[in-house]
């Protein structure tokens, strides 16, 4: 009887499908952001055929303690170790949010959505013109309709990849992308209000059944559905008392990029018409 129980347990263990983290090389578009006070978080780079490359993160990652945008942050490059792991390098480039008093970033028009796009161009970075930073193509940033087609629901397996370990480590050492799995705890298509960082904010949220740490802000979230992986959102904050994570659906980024793209197209047409 004990032998049969052992065989049954072995069958359950070997037949259970455990999710695997996304491919290591894919993680190279995720970056560590360090502010001058050694705070910071995570960001990910997206490139668009019209807009070019942008770094995406939460507004509070690049703001001071009273909510003002800081002038610049350090963004740490990635490198691959001999083991095949992607890590952040000690080498960093400067990313300026303001140049000669002018803001170069774009915020989401809803002030309750903690989202900012910062261009990665020669105007505001110390990146060499010959250097091409790894980035995600904009076609992987899904619209609201595309997200709806995925059938996201409570219990969907998700993966968060960020730099939660960074605040506890020396700024002069290599930092690892920190991957962990959880579940969607709540997903709705209706806006609702949450208390985030002592402020009530109203938006569409994905509540995550997993612990979120300060360095995770801005981290991309992936859904594992039918052996496929999809970028579905990014971390906005956490509730330390109840221990759940708060994220925004990625379609907020899709809509913001579309709005910027439409505005740029109009300006280009006006310039050609002169």
Image: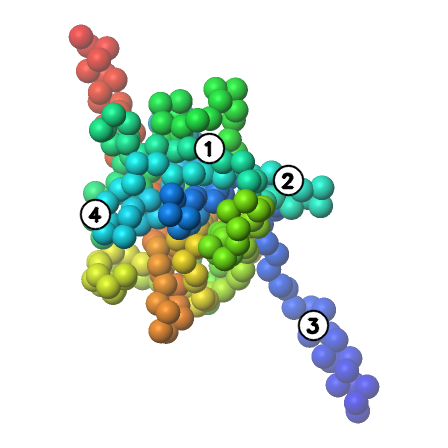
Q: Residue at x 40, y 71 (%)?
A: 243
Residue under label 2: 80
Q: Report if residue 114 is visible in the image.
A: no
For the residues labelled 1 and 2, the Cα–Cα distance comes to 18 Å
For the residues labelled 3 and 1, the Cα–Cα distance comes to 46 Å
Residue under label 3: 13
Image coordinates of residue 146 in percent, x first then y, are: 39, 46
- Numbered disc in front, either 2 or 3: 2
Residue under label 4: 110
Label 2 residue SS: strand
Q: Sequence-wise, which precedes: disc 2 or disc 4? A: 2
**Closest to the observer: 57 or 138?**
57
Kindly indicate whether the residue at mark 4 contacts the one at mark 1 (C-beta within 8 angstroms).
Answer: no
For the residues labelled 2 and 3, the Cα–Cα distance comes to 32 Å
Kindly indicate whether the residue at mark 1 contacts the one at mark 3 (C-beta within 8 angstroms).
Answer: no
Q: Residue most toward the bottom?
A: 1
Is 228 above or below relative to 196?
A: above
Residue under label 1: 93
Q: Sequence-wise, which precedes: disc 1 or disc 2? A: 2
**Rendering quarter of residue 197:** bottom left
Counting labels gives: 4
Q: Report if residue 102 is visible in the image.
A: yes
Image coordinates of residue 25 in percent, x first then y, are: 60, 41
């Amino acid at each position: 009887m004990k032998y049969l129980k052992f065989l049954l347990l072995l069958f359950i263990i070997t037949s259970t499908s455990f999710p695997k983290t996304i491919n290591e090389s894919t993680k190279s578009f995720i970056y560590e952001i360090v502010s001058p006070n050694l705070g910071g978080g995570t960001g990910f780079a997206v490139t668009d055929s019209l807009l070019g490359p942008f770094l995406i993160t939460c507004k509070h990652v690049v703001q001071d303690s009273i909510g003002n945008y800081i002038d610049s942050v350090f963004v740490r490059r990635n490198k691959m170790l001999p083991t095949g792991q992607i890590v952040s390098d000690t080498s960093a480039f400067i990313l300026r949010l303001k140049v000669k008093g002018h803001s170069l970033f774009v915020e989401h028009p809803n002030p309750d959505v903690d989202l900012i796009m910062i261009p990665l161009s020669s105007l505001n970075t110390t990146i060499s013109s010959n250097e091409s930073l790894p980035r995600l193509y904009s076609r992987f940033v899904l619209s609201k309709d595309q997200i709806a087609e995925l059938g996201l629901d409570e219990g969907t397996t998700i993966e968060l990849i960020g730099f939660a370990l960074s605040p506890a480590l020396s700024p002069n050492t290599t930092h690892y992308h920190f991957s962990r799995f959880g579940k969607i705890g709540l997903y709705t298509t209706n806006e609702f209000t949450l208390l985030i960082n002592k402020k009530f904010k109203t938006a569409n949220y994905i509540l995550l059944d997993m612990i979120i740490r300060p360095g995770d802000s801005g981290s991309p979230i992936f859904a594992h559905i039918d052996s496929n992986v999809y970028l579905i959102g990014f971390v906005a904050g956490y509730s330390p008392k109840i221990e759940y994570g708060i994220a925004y659906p990625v379609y907020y980024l899709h809509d913001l990029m579309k709005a910027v793209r439409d505005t740029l197209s109009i300006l280009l047409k006006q310039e050609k018409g002169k």
